[in-house]
Amino acid sequence: MQELQNIINSSHHIVFFGGAGVSTESGIPDFRSVDGLYSQKYAWPPEEILSRTFFFRRTEAFYRFYRDKMLALEAQPNAAHLKLAELERAGRLLSVVTQNIDGLHTKAGSRRVWELHGSVWRNHCLQCGKSFTPQFIRESEGVPHCDCGGVIKPDVVLYEEGLDEDVLSGAVHDIRQADTMIVAGTSLTVYPAAGLLRYFRGQHLVLINRDATPMDDMAELVIHDKVGQVLSGIEVTPVSEG
């Protein structure tokens, strides 16, 4: 912890790269752990349900799963989200790059957030482009439709879909500018997101994850623990005072 504190105290352009493990302490299950979504039983595997092909072929079944498992709208930011927002306000954190779609970084107060896989908080009509709230999606029945008759789709990146180019380029830009990169709560096995680490050219690479990752040997500091528990112990000082 002292080594992590020293790294943060010496950093002015931290980029935080986070996965599902960042949100588990907010009560949102991850995808690949023993208790995660991928270990549960459905008529189809979650990977298939959350695919573009399945969305268009079995839209009603998609929404049954989506409403049941993906819309954690009451979840609140945990210590990790709050500490990152504090680091940004202090001028030490450049941005958050997240694989999560829960919107908790924004809810915690972070302003520069690159949501690689989109967000459940944005939804649009495939026909006219009108926007809809996640509450509308949750409270609708069957396949949600717009007034114009078009099907509404969440702005989340499904399997078989590419990442948003503007979001991806923004994340790459910030990672290239970073002096420190903190990678947390991710197995680093989901591509192309995990491949973003190759753009980091800074001084300090820190990995925080409950389990070992394929990148542990590359990092200056590796902490196998809960993300919120680790970050909550960090004291934040503004850059002007650091």
Image: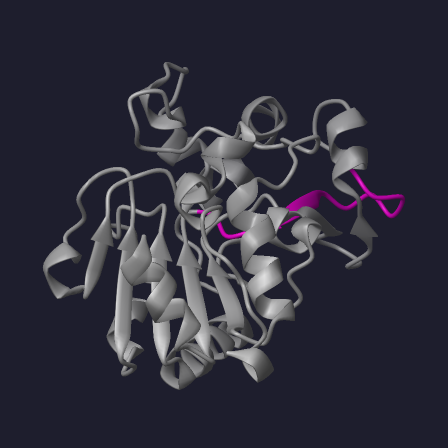
Q: Which residues are magenta?
A: 145-158
Residue 49 is left or right of residue 214, and the answer is right
Residue 179 is left or right of residue 118, and the answer is left
At which x and y percent is residue 36? 37, 25
Q: Write the residue at 46% across / 63% down.
A: 163
Residue 180 is left or right of residue 235, and the answer is left
Q: Write the residue at 45% across / 32% down.
A: 49
* Pick the front one: 130 or 80: 80
Q: Write the residue at 46% across / 37% down.
A: 50
Q: Is residue 140 visible?
A: no
**Magenta region, main secondary structure:** loop
* Residue at the left extreme of this rendering: 217
At which x and y percent is residue 68? 59, 21
At which x and y percent is residue 225? 30, 39
232 inside magenta stretch? no
* Pick the front one: 136 or 77: 77
Q: Is residue 2 above or below residue 33?
A: below
* Residue at the right extreme of this rendering: 147
Q: Is residue 135 above or below residue 99?
A: above
Q: Looking at the rendering, which quadrant does residue 87 occupy?
A: bottom right
Residue 123 is left or right of residue 215, and the answer is right
